[in-house]
Amino acid sequence: MSILESIILGIIQGLTEFLPVSSSGHLELGHAVLGMDNKENLLFATVVHGATVLSTLVVFRKDIIQLITGIFAGNKESIRYALLIMLSCVPVFVVGIFFKDKVESLYAGNIAMVGFMLLITALLLSLTHFSKSGKKSIGGWNAVIIGIAQTLAVVPGISRSGATIATSLLMGNDKKEATRFSFLMVLIPIIGANFLQLLSGEVTQADQIGTLPLVAGFISAFVFGLLACSWMLRIVQRGKLIYFALYCFIIGAFAIFAG
């Protein structure tokens, strides 16, 4: 992997992890365009995912600190919110533990499948454009359903942020709260998955990729992750998800045609 390729893939990961256009789908497309083997760099994927997790921690640092201090102080609302986040993670952990091989088999460079899934993402985002804005707080059943929506995003082309935010909005939840919950709920699964990958030894060795490409990919994913995370907060508040629906529709149709 060259430094330029790592920067490009890092930018793709950073932007698409938070924007509702599917990071996994765009990485599949990126590998295809660059003519790369998408199975050769589990270590690189782990590194750039770590970078986007760091982006989330930076953007939501005040919320996270407030939540942690609230838990230790015995604040009921903080404890309730933390339990909701953990509850939302249950579906994706079940899939990750019992269906790991089937999930990994989806990442085989099937561009046409990615295209069809992007069309589904476009449909989900379109539905939010025609739904009424709600003011509800996220409850237990909301967390479970949003967690199921997150699980669907293991399929490349289904946007995790798009699926979780759209599902939350369609249930009548507050826009700001829907976005905040969507970004905070992903921290545990991504950190957990990356940690397990490192422990299992499934990732390739750094010398097979090169230190500089890893560093370049991490930095580009982190910087563009910061930008995308901040943008997304404003985009949802302004109800501009329809533009991403159009984008996913166009890219999805192109991928189907190219595949």
Image (cartoon, rainbow, N blue to C red):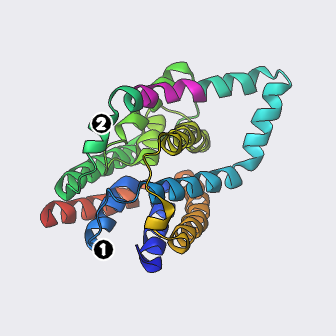
Query: What is the x, y in percent for residue 16?
Result: 45, 59
Q: Is residue 92 magenta?
A: yes
Can residue 184 be seen?
A: yes
Query: What is the x, y in percent for residue 174?
Result: 58, 38
Q: Nearer the viewer, residue 100 or 247?
A: 100
The amino acid marked with disc number 2 is: Asp
Q: Which mark is residue 101?
A: 2
Q: Quadrant of residue 36?
A: bottom left
Q: Which residues are magenta?
A: 85-94
Marks 1 and 2, how far apart at CA: 26 Å
Compared across the picture, whether 23 is left or right of 219 comes to left
Query: What is the x, y in percent for residue 133?
Result: 50, 40
Q: Earlier in the sequence, mark 1 or mark 2?
A: 1
Q: Secondary structure at mark 2?
A: helix
Q: Nearer the viewer, residue 122 or 215?
A: 215
Can residue 240 be seen?
A: no
Q: Which residue is mark 1?
A: 34
Q: Is residue 45 above or below residue 104?
A: below
The residue at the point 31 percent across, 39 percent down is 103
By secondary structure, the bulk of the magenta-drawn segment is best described as: helix
Question: Which quadrant does the C terminus fall into?
Answer: bottom left
The residue at the point 27 percent across, 36 percent down is 102
Query: What is the x, y in percent for residue 227?
Result: 59, 65
Compared across the picture, whether 115 is left or right of 223 comes to left
Q: Secondary structure at mark 1?
A: helix
Numbered disc total: 2
